Amino acid sequence: MNRLPRFAPWVLFALAGCFCVAVCHLRMIPILPTVSAAVAGAQDQAPQDQGQDPAAVNMAPSGPSYTTEAPPPPDEASAPGESPDDSGYAEQPTATAPEPPPALPDYQQPPPPGDGYLWQPGYWAWGPSGYYWVPGAWIEPPYMGALWTPGYWGFYSGRYMFYPGHWGQHIGFYGGINYGFGYIGLGYEGGYWNGGHFFYNRVYNNVNVRSVHNVYHYNAGNRVSSLARGNINPHTSYRGGNGGVQARPQPSEGAAWHEPTASRMTSQVQHAQQFQSNRGQSASTNHGRPATMAISKPLPADRNVKPTVRAQGNSTPNRGGSEREEHK
């Protein structure tokens, strides 16, 4: 009669151990996937664990012979007749305006229609009625390996001037403007050419994998953050002046401008002209929210546009679209 109480604690301990083992066995299957998913998510958000940036090939190698001069202070006007400071690494301005362009709006990017199309981000252009929004669009490049450097507004000599974009082997200077969709202000993170095919970064592009097959994933978040530190408003649409992006061209951007380049295609110029008289695109009417932010129909390529070496003192080597899209 006295032996049962002596072994009772050991019996209860054994039963409790069996119960714990059974519970852990039942819960093991749901626990492991949850932990694995959390670890995978953490790794996916850590740029330092992604390896080398594939889009680094978009930046031109900068040799020691190329140097850039610091731009003048934001509010300092140049002497009468002096060329704009950006004329050494951008095409000649096609428009001037007495006031800065509105902030860049947020909008959705349509998916690319297929492999090989490049994104031209939307931008503010100047017309007879003031600023109007040119919708973003996918473009068929004029030649294999071409990259699009967007145009930008810059302040100089008391005026705001629009420097149009251009095609080239590498990404040039576009004022440090963060247009989004891979154009973070320096270089291009939206994709890169490899073996005659364009590979799309799904972090910055709205890609439908059923129509686009060359994709990858790379988050350049750390570099984007570092570039944006000097820009209080991430939607700033111009360089220099009060409130503008205070960016200086990097040696790689200047080197890209000294490579063979080509001006805008006629289809790009016509695209801008098409929305000039649309009241819904006018900043005075839409108050910074254009009726059409982007279009899904791609712009066709102009195969007559070829990259050429720029003659000394000539900033316009090949004008695929010679018409000026904006009015002074």
Image (tube, rainbow, N blue to C red):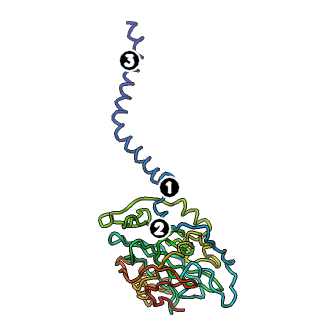
- Depth order, front residue of 213/96: 213
* Above or below: residue 134 compared with residue 31: below
Residue type highlighted by circle 2: Gly
Q: How many marks?
A: 3
Given the current orientation, which residue lies at the most extreme top position?
1
- Contact flag, marks 3 and 1 (Cβ < 8 Å): no
Residue located beneath label 3 in the image: 11
Q: CA distance from mark 3 to mark 1?
A: 54 Å
Q: CA distance from mark 2 to mark 3?
A: 66 Å
Q: Earlier in the sequence, mark 1 or mark 2?
A: 1
* Above or below: residue 110 compared with residue 36: below
| Residue 221 x %, y % | 51, 60
Residue at (42, 49) in percent of width and height: 40
Residue 266 falls in image quadrant: bottom left
Q: CA distance from mark 1 to mark 2?
A: 15 Å
- Depth order, front residue of 260/97: 260
Numbered mark located on residue 182 in the image: 2
Residue at (30, 67) in percent of width and height: 211
Residue at (65, 85) in percent of width and height: 157
Given the current orientation, which residue lies at the most extreme left position?
210
Task: Answer with left or right where residue 59 lies relative to residue 108.
Answer: right
- For the C terminus, which image quadrant? bottom right
- For the N terminus, which image quadrant? top left
Numbered mark located on residue 47 in the image: 1
Residue at (42, 11) in percent of width and height: 6
